[in-house]
Amino acid sequence: MSSLQVGLAVAGGLILGGVIAYNTWNARRHEPRQAQPDTQPQPLPEQRVEPVIDGAMAEPERREPVLDPDMDNRPPPDFATTSTLAMLPLPDRRPRMDALIDVIAPIALDGRVVSGDALLAALPATRRVGSKPFAVEGQNERSGEWEHPVAGQRYTTCQAGVQLANRTGALNEIEYSEFVMKAQHYADAVGGAPDFPEMLEEVARARELDQFAGQHDAQLGFTLRARGTAWSPGFVQQQAAKLGFVAGAIPGRMVLPSSEPGLPPILDLSFDAQAALSDDLAHSALKEITLNLDVPQVHRHERPFARLRDAAFTLAEAMGGVITDDAGQPLRSETIDTIGADLERLYGTLEAHDLAAGSPQARRLFS
């Protein structure tokens, strides 16, 4: 083999090696960023060390047994009762009906007292009238409070209601007629007589409430877009978890829980559900995620907008992203501050109309 052939073979080998190296580097450069393992050392279990005084083992302080004079008078614990109470379901925390956002039809029981079991048994199979929630309440004989019927309780009177408006629109004449039929059937089942308000007045009130809600509804969303390298679902979840987000019930969704159990989350973070369900999460690439705030659903004292803003900037810095609106336009800090000022005025307007953000009435109306 001549020297020329040897040189060409060497040059070809170097070029091939360079191409392979470049392709390997380029593939790694475009791989989505992965979650990093937790490198913090786990604390070792503390060893018990007895205190030592002058090199001698100190004896623990001796305590004389003390008899409780009331011990003999205490009844023994009823483990069966305790276990039964622990298994009982919690009371229904659904918000009560409100004349501000509900049509309410009283149902007279002619002085009779009806059990909660009877009121529950007579409930219709579907608790909706068209697209609006249908509800029944009773006045508790013992407390005098209106509440959703509870088994084992007794009620002196009851009432049926339907919501005037929600995000699907206002209660219309057809839905009102359906409500009358459903409430009449329920009243017949419990032996009561309903008293329905005038349909035209209630429908007009529903339209007015729906118009107000449409003008004062707000759902904010910030989009985080990757500047360069994409993100894996695990990387997004790891960064969001550092800010208090937890996995939601829907794939591709994480939520920042409310400080009060049972209330809607403060914020939610969403990304492509197909990427979250992929068999190979490490190679699922995400180029954007969205942070959302449903303003009327969250109490003002939770500082939801400030937490939305802080989460967006923190994640953008940690993940190498940029904050944009739905159209992909970058959002500057001054623009975000302007949105916050407008939101404060919205909070004030809702409170002035007894529909404060996060209140039961607001959560129902804006749902």
Image: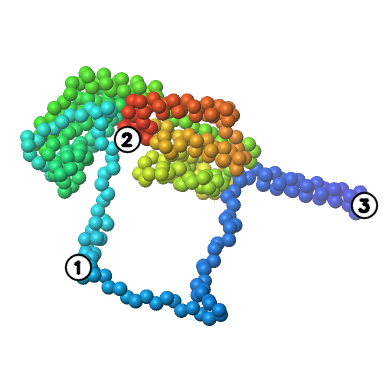
Given this view, does label 3 or label 1 mark the residue nearer the observer? Answer: 1
Q: CA distance from mark 3 to mark 1?
A: 111 Å
User: Can the viewer see residue 247?
Assistant: yes
Residue at label 3?
A: 2
Which amino acid type corresponds to the residue marked 2 in the rendered image?
A: Pro
Vertical arrangement, residue 307 with respect to residue 39, above or below:
above
Given this view, does label 1 or label 2 mark the residue nearer the observer? Answer: 1
Q: Secondary structure at mark 3?
A: loop
Residue at label 1?
A: 73
Q: Nearer the viewer, residue 167 or 76?
A: 76
Given this view, does label 3 or label 2 mark the residue nearer the observer? Answer: 2
Name the N-terminal-most of marks 3 and 1. Answer: 3
Q: CA distance from mark 1 to mark 2?
A: 46 Å
Q: Residues within 10 Å of mark 3 (few under 14, many from 20)?
A: few
Give the left or right position of residue 228, taking residue 99 as reference: right
Vertical arrangement, residue 208 with respect to residue 306, above or below:
above
Which amino acid type corresponds to the residue marked 1 in the rendered image?
A: Asn
Task: Please tell me in which quadrant of the rendered image residue 120 appears.
Answer: top left
Q: Position of residue 192 (x, y in %)?
A: 10, 34
- Residue shown at 50% from the left, 75% from the top: 50
Which amino acid type corresponds to the residue marked 3 in the rendered image?
A: Ser
Give the left or right position of residue 45, taking residue 351 as reference: right
Looking at the image, the residue that sits furthest to the bottom is 56
Q: Nearer the viewer, residue 126 or 102?
A: 102
